[in-house]
Image: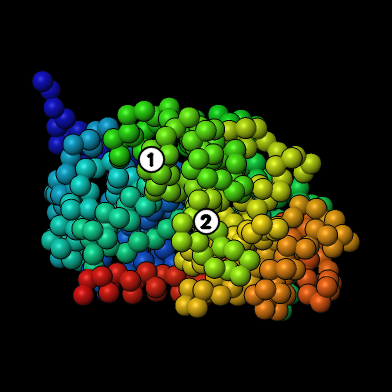
Amino acid sequence: MLSISPAEIVTRLHFDNPWWENGEVEERYKNYPRRFYFKPFFKLVNEFSINRAAVLMGPRRVGKTVMVYHAIDKLLEQGVNPHNILYISLETPIYTGLSLEKIVNLFQEEFSHKRNGELYIIFDEIQYLSNWEVHLKSLVDSYPTYKYVATGSAAAALKLKSRESGAGRFTEFLLPPLTFAEYISFIGKVDSLIETDEENWHEAKNIEELNKEFINYLNYGGYPEAVFSKLIQGESSRYIKSDIIDKVLLRDLPSLYGINDVQELNKLFNAIAYNTGNEISYESLSKSSGVSKNTIKKYMEYLEAAFLIKTINRVDVTSKKFKRATTFKVYLTNPSMRAALFGPVTEKHDVMGTLTETAIFSQWFHNENIDKLHYARWKTGEVDIVWLDNANQKPDWCVEVKWSDLPCTDSRMLSSVIEYVKKNNLPDALVTTKTIKQEGNFDGVSVRFQPSSSYTYTLGANILNEESLERQLSNSLVTNENESI
């Protein structure tokens, strides 16, 4: 049986690292705008004072590989020797079965690198290598002057393995789908659509136009590649479903967790996607998907591991948690997935309420405090989003999500949020609308109304501002430092 020779592997390495020959990253990568996350990520890539690998995690097609190429481009701009940068995608068949150390050894031999040099070594889609965390930790320990970057699409699974075997040697960096603010920036319409006040609230210059882009964001805007391709936008069901969702459900998760019945997993995900933003139970999911409750619990862990969904727990009208939670909400991490599965939506679509709620909630996937988010429901009412202080289990604020302007004039639509504010002694409530921004007082409760699209933009922009991202990076470094003690 023939085997792949080292010479063939080195030839492929040269193909995958064109800067070795011409000193530049391919133009197609340079032309993509940079994610808001790029600055803190590059700081992590260029950090040699601590001996750790950077593990870039996130779902498929959110721009991990492009952000890596942007980092390589910036390293080259700063004068790093092109021969000191290695990029390798472990999805490439020729590398199958190769250990990470063998790859590094071939790189060292090709350019006569010393073990104490400053090299940048990037392993893309590292989850395809069995026991990757053991191999990577060994390299970090063996070559402490090299900087390692690994990317992967199964976020929770990568995080679990990195903390089990890489404590003190890995720094995790999460890249979620595009926020609405990033989407507006990518299409170059920030100046024409958004104005920012002194308190960093972002308002719409033209709410009708912003709402049009909000609908586009719901349909395809979570994926950078789709933003720039009319072909993908016109065939989102084929691109997003086949190239993103199906690969995760039919290949990634079965290979990572040994799932035999992929159709069961597919049925469950379809049921969840169809009901994103709605309250569900294991019982109702079992009936709609035909999957047993015990299997559902296991599969939902896998879907969260792939960063496709997020489960949110319920509290009562006084913000108390339930000892035995029988119902919960599940949100898609990217609202575009629903449109890909069941067709695009318009502003008058029946699901605009829950899809708007999903979009607003998805902005919080970019914040390390997402676990503070809950929803409140009791016999006579419900509030969509509640932020609980983990220390005292009391709410700091609440939001009721609407894709309608009726709440501004019909106080009956505000009865639940008014009751919740009174029960929890909150200063006010925020209610999102379709187009109206105003303030009012209803039954002694101050209510702020904000269009859903501008509120979604504000969340994404403020959660991903430079100060917030720097804080998240610092917290990640501190967490890893504590784990190594």
* Colour approach in the figure: rainbow
Mark identifier at residue 260: none
At 21% from the left and 58% from the top, the residue drawn is 165
Give the secondary structure at mark 1: helix
Q: Which residue is identified by label 1?
A: 294
At 20% from the left and 33% from the top, the residue drawn is 8
- Amino acid carrying mark 2 in the image: Ile
Mark identifier at residue 312: 2
Q: Is residue 406 left or right of residue 238?
A: right
For residue 135, above or below residue 114: above
Tell me the quadrant of the picture where the N terminus can be found. top left
The image shows residue 385 at horizontal and vertical percentages of: 62, 62
Residues 192 and 303: in front is 303
Q: Residue furthest top?
A: 1
- Amino acid carrying mark 1 in the image: Asn
Q: Is residue 453 left or right of residue 288?
A: right
Tell me the quadrant of the picture where the C terminus can be found. bottom left
Does the rendering let one see residue 20? no
The image shows residue 13 at horizontal and vertical percentages of: 26, 41
Residues 278 and 167: in front is 278
For residue 417, which quarter of the picture? Answer: bottom right
Give the secondary structure at mark 2: strand
The label nearer to you, 1 versus 2, is 1
Residues 221 and 309: in front is 309
